[in-house]
Every structure is written in structure tokens, then in C-alpha cells.
Amino acid sequence: MKVDIENWKSQIRKGYLDLCILLIIDSKKRIYGFELLDVLKKLDLPVKEGTLYPLLSRMSSDGLLTTEWETENTSGHPRKFYSLTKTGRAAVSEMQNEFDKLVIIYKEIKKLEDK
């Protein structure tokens, strides 16, 4: 049996992409879509618009994000800015805790290999 590593990587990435997006929005306090795409790319986590915007829409529907259109002080097109809601901040905290547990488990397993 051969493991499909690319499929595994894709599934892992889907699992932590929400967390990464929410963490970036939390750190910036307010961000618009193209800026978020740029930050993700710089973090070597490139995401296509067709992936990002449905995620942002779902997160908004789930009450994790609030949106605000800004038409002034922008060069060119109006921009839709995303910010975390109180529910979003709570979700980020829970997601971080779960991710931290995963890292701890991984480190413990690596220690077993050394024995």
C-alpha cells in the first residue's frame, strides 16, 4: 500500500489554514483580502483567491469575522476589511490550544525515537 503524501499534505493544510488565517487577522486587527493573500504567500502558504474568499465568507457566516467596506483612503477599488469578533477570538484561542497539544504530542513521540 502506497501512501499518497500529496493528499495527506493537502488534508493537513486544510486543517491548519483556518487557524493561520484567523491568527493573521488577529495580529493585524483588520485586513483586506489581497493583503491577506500576500501575507500567506510570504509565509510560504500560498492560497488562491478561489480558496480564500469562500473561507472568509464561511468564517463571517459562522460569526468568527466581521466585515467592513472601506471606500475612502484606498487607491482604486473599495476594500472589504475583515476583523475578528469576540467569538472569533475565542475560536482562535481554542484552535491554538489544540495545535499546541499536537506539537507536544509530536515532540513526545520524537523523544521515544531517541530511546
Image (cartoon, helix red, strand yellow):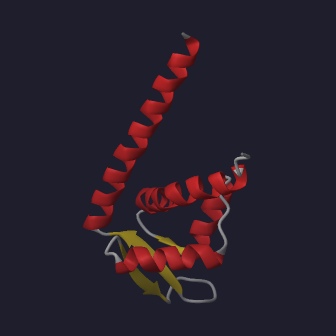
In the rendered view, tell whether residue 68 sits above or below residue 101.
below
Q: Image check: 41 left or right of 62?
A: right
Q: Image check: 33 left or right of 101?
A: right
Question: In the rendering, at what x and y percent does residue 10 appear?
Answer: 63, 58
Relative depth, front residue between 50 and 32: 50
Direction front: furthest residue: 1
In the rendered view, tell whether residue 39 sits above or below residue 106.
below
Question: In the rendering, at what x and y percent does residue 30 appear?
Answer: 43, 69
Residue 69, image quadrant? bottom left
Relative depth, front residue between 30 and 65: 65
Q: How many marks?
A: 0
Residue depicted at x 31% and y 51%: 94
In the rendered view, tell whether residue 2 sits above or below residue 20.
above
Residue 6, image quadrant? bottom right
Relative depth, front residue between 19 and 37: 19
Tell me if residue 43 can be seen. no
Question: In the rendering, at what x and y percent does residue 66 appear?
Answer: 36, 77
Direction top: furthest residue: 115
Residue depicted at x 40% and y 83%: 68
The quadrant of the image that shows the C terminus is top right
Q: Image check: 5 left or right of 15?
A: right
Relative depth, front residue between 90 and 69: 90
Residue depicted at x 43% and y 31%: 104
Question: In the rendering, at what x and y percent does residue 87 appear?
Answer: 27, 66
Tell me if residue 109 can be seen. yes
The quadrant of the image that shows the N terminus is top right
Residue depicted at x 50% and y 74%: 55
